[in-house]
Image (spheres, rainbow, N blue to C red):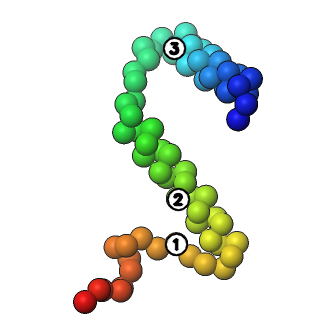
Amino acid sequence: MDKAKAITAVAHKLARLIYMMLTKGEEYTDQGQQYYEERYRERVLHHLAKKAEKLGLKLVSNEDCEFKPS
């Protein structure tokens, strides 16, 4: 993303936050780094699953896997 697009994205996010605070009368609460990392992880997994589906594959988690190393 180039500099102009990044600035526009940040400005848009700030505008949405301010609008929500003004219309709902709520204070801004920071969700914390863990919240954003979890959202990023979910987004990445979602896109990987879509790519795998296009290739005729399916993503499975380690808990779902039947393979047991000896």
Circle on res. 30: none
Looking at this view, is 19 or 56 the one in front? 56
- Place residue 30 in its image quadrant: top left
Circle on res. 45: 2
Q: Is residue 5 visible?
A: yes
Q: Position of residue 48 (x, y in %)?
A: 59, 63
Q: At 50% from the left edge and 46% from the top edge, which residue is drawn?
A: 40
Whether 69 is drawn above or below 21: the answer is below
**Mark 3, residue position:** 21
- Which residue is situated farthest in the bottom direction here? 70
In the image, what residue type sits under mark 2? Leu
Whether 1 is drawn above or below 19: the answer is below
Q: Secondary structure at mark 3?
A: helix
Q: Left of 34 or right of it: where is 51?
A: right
Q: Mark 1, residues whose alpha carbon is within 10 Å: few (<14), some, or many (≥20)? A: some
Q: Mark 3, residues whose alpha carbon is within 10 Å: few (<14), some, or many (≥20)? A: few
Disc 1 to disc 2: CB gap under 8 Å: yes
Which mark is in front, 3 or 1?
A: 1
**Mark 1, residue position:** 59
Looking at this view, is 3 or 64 the one in front? 3
In the image, what residue type sits under mark 3? Met
Of labels 1 and 2, earlier in sequence is 2
Of labels 3 and 2, earlier in sequence is 3
